[in-house]
Amino acid sequence: MQTTSRATQTSHPSSSEWEAHTSLAAELERAKEELEIISYVASHDLQAPLRNIIFACEELNTKQSLSLDKPGQEALQRITNEAARMKTLMQGMLDYLRLETFGPAHSLLDSNEILGVAHTILEEKIQNTGAQIQSDALPPIYGHRGRLTRLFVNLIDNALKFHSQEQPVIHISARGTDEGWEFCVEDNGIGIDEEYNDIIFGLFQRLHTADAYPGDGIGLALSRKIVESHGGKLWVEATPGVGSRFKFTLPISKNT
């Protein structure tokens, strides 16, 4: 009886595949370095002149000896407002870039506690709008405390901003799914047309003028990036004139 031995074959990447892999890794590393440079320039070189502009405007506003006519006062106020808006935009851009370049360690967190902190941060806006914030008992989650707090703040703040003529009611809930925990921030606000369901998550994308609804067009883009940095996804289900349900998934455990 003749036996046939078969050598175990191991698949090795070809030289061209290895070169392509190495080239991609190098490009990703260069892209990360460029983002870090942009982040540094935005946080230092660009903010320095902006701070000087804001300081100069404050000085002009407080100078008792300075006499400006009404057009001059209005022009100064416009400069002050635009400088403050530019500062907000720059800070939002920095926060967005840091999500690309900085990956902190995650830990087990109490999402009820995180929601409580978000509620405290938004306390003044909640009182000014007369909003009711309701929540179910929320599950423990794995993630970064600062980023997830920012996520809840952004989504609740968005609901407060786009409220209807009715008293704002915002409900936060969560349920278990095959993908992990699915959270929902539901409101009874103005809602969104379905054709804009994905557009609103783009960086600097706005559906309304700043006069109608103040904002920088960064909050929802940053929120999606935060969720994605946790391995989840964020989307919206909305009906114009009825309200919106912003839903996002988070892992049940650190191994998910």
Image (cartoon, helix red, strand yellow):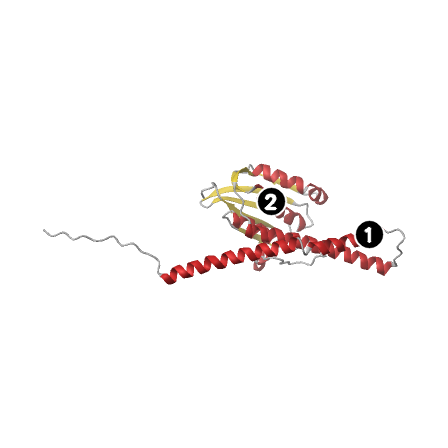
Q: Is residue 38 above or below residue 144?
A: below
The outermost residue toward the bottom is: 16
Image quarter for residue 192? Answer: bottom right
- Count of marks, rendered view: 2
Position in image of residue 251 (x %, y %): 48, 43
In the picture, the disc for residue 59 is 1
Find disc 2 in the rendering and name its residue.
152
Q: Residue at x 66, y 39 (%)?
A: 120
Position in image of residue 106 (x %, y %): 52, 42
Quadrant in the picture for the C terminus = top left
Q: Is residue 35 above or below residue 168?
A: below
Secondary structure of residue under mark 2:
helix
Q: Is residue 71 left or right of residue 179?
A: right
Given residues 54 and 85, the one toward you in this image is 54
Identify the mark nearer the N-term, 2 or 1.
1
In front: label 2 or label 1: 1
Secondary structure of residue under mark 1:
helix
Residues under labels 2 and 1: Cα distance?
A: 37 Å
Position in image of residue 166 (x %, y %): 68, 47
Residue type, mark 1 in image = Glu
Badges 2 and 1: C-beta atoms under 8 Å apart?
no
In the picture, the disc for residue 217 is none
Q: Is residue 192 visible?
A: no
Q: Residue at x 64, y 52 (%)?
A: 92
Position in image of residue 53 (x %, y %): 76, 56
Q: Residue at x 68, y 56 (%)?
A: 46
For label 2, count other residues whose C-alpha is less than 10 Å away and answer few (under 14), some (14-19) or many (20+). Answer: many
The outermost residue toward the left is: 1
Residue type, mark 2 in image = Phe
For label 1, count other residues whose C-alpha is less than 10 Å away and answer few (under 14), some (14-19) or many (20+). Answer: few
Given residues 181 and 44, the one toward you in this image is 44
Image quarter for residue 57? Answer: bottom right
